[in-house]
Image: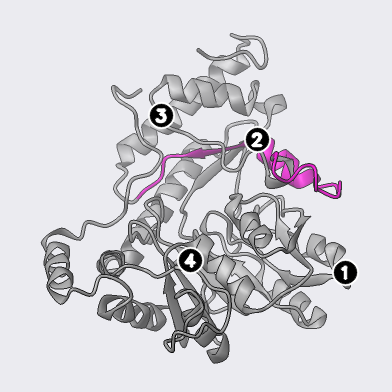
């Protein structure tokens, strides 16, 4: 289908000459970290999201680590297993115990019913994920957290620009944490942002990102060097321009994929509930071998043979990864296991051309026809 590899992702936004001017200003100022551009980005992000406090950090992972530290938690944190493993790593870094909950079969986000099942007297926090930019069930999760009197911290790595009704992701829970790494819709190169309505927590986080030092050289908590550089903040600021248009384009691509692939037997898709806006950071299909005719891994190989870069996000799920499987309590996660074994993420980014979307769809349709004809034994490589 393609003469050279079609990438699954491409960095969003093109800052151009304006960003080079920003770099010159930063170098002339001789303040390279956590200075005027960082403050300007925090202010612009707070205005966009509609949240009083934004704290820029070096990465989403660092932000999660610092939020858990600043809240001074002890015990267990309920977290989905169907997520990028850094979500769970942030829990372990704080000496807390991850307790894995199942995901919803339609949205792929954490299941509120499973969260309720996992609550105990040892629950210190709940840490849901807005998966692939699809907002989690915030209304139900807020109610669960309120009744349990436990902090609700969202991993919003994929979701700067996602919405629930008129409310932006970033305005929910105790805190939310975004990522601006190169695969995201808003790119800073590297970097993250913590949002909260809690002024005291924001103050602690500003100290925590600076080794725990609020400015008097006498740290108030065990922090990290998690400051955002001025260069990353400047790039993120430029990326805010045109953000909504890029999200709209990604949603158009999602709908184009759905239009082309919806009728393919054995394929199903992540559902975005009515009234939600997803950033569509990823577009993923589930491959049921009994309907499609071959496994997810067979399709993975077939598409790579067509020079289409696809990924198995997220497989294996965290509870089956070697760092966690020995400590996993054995709680059954049937939906997580099923989704993880079938998921395949396709190329999506705002600069992706319609004709290339159609060629990816055509490759899947061709693979499906070949699979249904029984051209290969089930599970055999397409190579």
| Res. 167 in view | no
Q: Give the range drawn in magenta.
A: 322-349
Disc 2 to disc 4, how far (Cα)? 27 Å
Which is nearer the N-term, disc 4 or disc 3? 4
The circle drawn on residue 308 is: 3
Q: Is residue 339 magenta?
A: yes
On the image, the x and y values in percent for residue 122 come to 85, 70
Q: Say which label, 1 or 3, has the lower sequence index.
A: 1
Does residue 109 lie above or below 294 as drawn?
A: below
Give the residue displayed 53% in from the left and 91% down from the top.
199
Q: Are marks 2 and 3 in contact (CB under 8 Å)?
A: no
Q: Is residue 92 visible?
A: yes
- N-terminal of the pair, mark 2 or mark 3, is 3
Q: Residue furthest front?
A: 218
Residue 115 place in picture, x, y as percent: 79, 64
Mark 2 — residue?
342
Q: Camera-side residue: 304 or 331?
A: 331
Spatial CA span between label 1 and label 3: 45 Å
Answer with mark 2 or mark 4, whichever residue precedes in sequence: 4
Q: Name the residue under label 4.
A: 178
For disc 4, the neighbor class at 10 Å (few under 14, some 14 to 19, many from 20) is many
Please give the residue where the numbered disc 1 appears in the rendered image: 120
Q: Nearer the viewer, mark 2 or mark 1?
A: 1
């Amino acid at each position: 289908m393609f003469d050279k590899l079609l990438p699954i992702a491409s960095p969003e936004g093109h800052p151009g000459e304006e960003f080079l001017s920003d770099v010159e200003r930063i170098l002339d100022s001789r303040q390279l970290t956590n200075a005027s551009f960082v403050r300007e980005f925090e202010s612009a992000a707070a205005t966009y999201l509609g949240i009083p406090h934004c704290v820029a950090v070096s990465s989403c992972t660092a932000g999660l680590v610092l939020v858990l530290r600043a809240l001074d938690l002890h015990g267990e944190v309920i977290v989905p297993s169907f997520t990028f493993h850094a979500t769970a790593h942030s829990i372990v870094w704080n000496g807390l115990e991850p307790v894995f909950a199942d995901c919803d079969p339609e949205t792929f986000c954490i299941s509120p019913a499973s969260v309720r099942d996992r609550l105990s007297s040892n629950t210190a926090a709940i840490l849901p994920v807005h998966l692939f930019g699809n907002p989690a069930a915030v209304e139900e999760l807020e109610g669960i957290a309120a009744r349990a009197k436990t902090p609700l911290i969202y991993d919003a790595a994929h979701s700067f620009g996602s919405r629930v009704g008129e409310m932006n992701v970033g305005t929910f829970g105790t805190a939310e944490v975004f990522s601006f790494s190169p695969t995201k819709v808003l790119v800073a190169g590297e970097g993250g942002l913590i949002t909260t309505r809690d002024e005291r927590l924001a103050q602690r986080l500003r100290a925590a990102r600076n080794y725990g030092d609020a400015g008097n050289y006498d740290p108030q908590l065990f922090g990290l060097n998690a400051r955002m550089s001025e260069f990353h903040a400047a790039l993120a600021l430029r990326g805010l321009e045109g953000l909504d248009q890029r999200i709209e384009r990604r949603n158009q691509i999602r709908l184009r994929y759905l239009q082309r692939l919806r009728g393919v037997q054995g394929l199903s898709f992540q559902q975005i509930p009515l009234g939600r806006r997803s950033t569509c950071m990823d577009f993923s299909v589930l491959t049921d071998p009994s309907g499609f005719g071959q496994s997810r891994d067979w399709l993975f190989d077939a598409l790579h043979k067509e020079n289409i870069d696809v990924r198995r996000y997220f497989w294996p799920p965290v509870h089956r990864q070697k760092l966690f499987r020995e400590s996993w309590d054995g709680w059954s996660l049937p939906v997580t296991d099923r989704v993880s074994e079938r998921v395949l993420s396709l190329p999506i980014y705002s600069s992706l051309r319609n004709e290339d979307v159609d060629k990816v769809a055509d490759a899947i349709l061709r693979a499906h026809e070949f699979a249904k004809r029984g051209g290969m034994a089930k599970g055999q490589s397409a190579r």
